[in-house]
Image (cartoon, grey):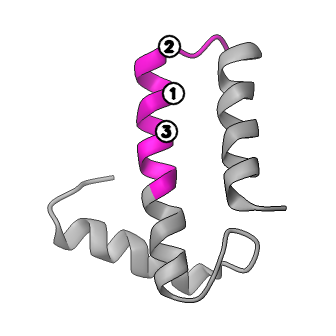
Amino acid sequence: MAAGVTLATFLETMVVERGAAAATVEAYRRDLEAWIGFLAQRGRDVETASTEDVAAHLGELEARGFEA
């Protein structure tokens, strides 16, 4: 399944089933699109991502000043 379809389905679920606010959905969209872009730069996608990809992405975010 394409990441865009997966993302759209997830965000729709957040709204319909969880009642997520627009700001929450936008934050999820922004963060997940960044994750998908990061994976694409590594030649991966959400279905092939490894724990090493997650660690690398978190390390990059930390280097940019983001915190968990």
Label 2's element? loop
**Against 40, is 31 above or below?**
above
Q: Does the magenta stretch include residue 16?
A: no
Q: Is residue 33 left or right of residue 11?
A: left
Quarter assignment of residue 8: top right
Label 1's element? helix
Secondary structure character of the magenta stretch overall: helix
Question: Where in the figure is residue 49, as x and y percent of width and height?
Answer: 65, 78
Of the residues shown, which amino acid type is indicated by label 3?
Answer: Tyr
Tag on residue 21?
2
Question: Where in the figure is residue 47, as x and y percent of width and height?
Answer: 76, 72
Label 3's element? helix
> Magenta residues, as a range?
18-33
Q: Given contact means CB atoms under 8 Å apart, are the residues at marks 1 and 3 in contact?
A: yes
Q: Given contact means CB atoms under 8 Å apart, are the residues at marks 2 and 3 in contact?
A: no
Please give the name of the residue rendered at 65% of the width and 82% of the height, measured from the top-left corner. Answer: 50
Q: Name the residue under label 1.
A: 25
Q: Name the residue under label 3.
A: 28
Please give the name of the residue rendered at 32% of the width and 76% of the height, measured from the top-left corner. Answer: 59
Of residues 65 and 42, which is closer to you in this image?
42
Crowd class of label 3 (few under 14; some 14 to 19; many from 20; radius 10 Å) = some
Q: Does the magenta stretch include residue 24?
A: yes
Q: In this view, does 25 lie to the left or right of 31?
A: right
Of the residues shown, which amino acid type is indicated by label 2?
Answer: Ala
Crowd class of label 2 (few under 14; some 14 to 19; many from 20; radius 10 Å) = few
Please give the name of the residue rendered at 57% of the width and 16% of the height, measured from the top-left corner. Answer: 20
Q: In this view, does 2 lie to the left or right of 4?
A: right
Closer to the chain start, of discs 2 and 3, is: 2
Q: Which residue lies furthest to the left in this view?
A: 65
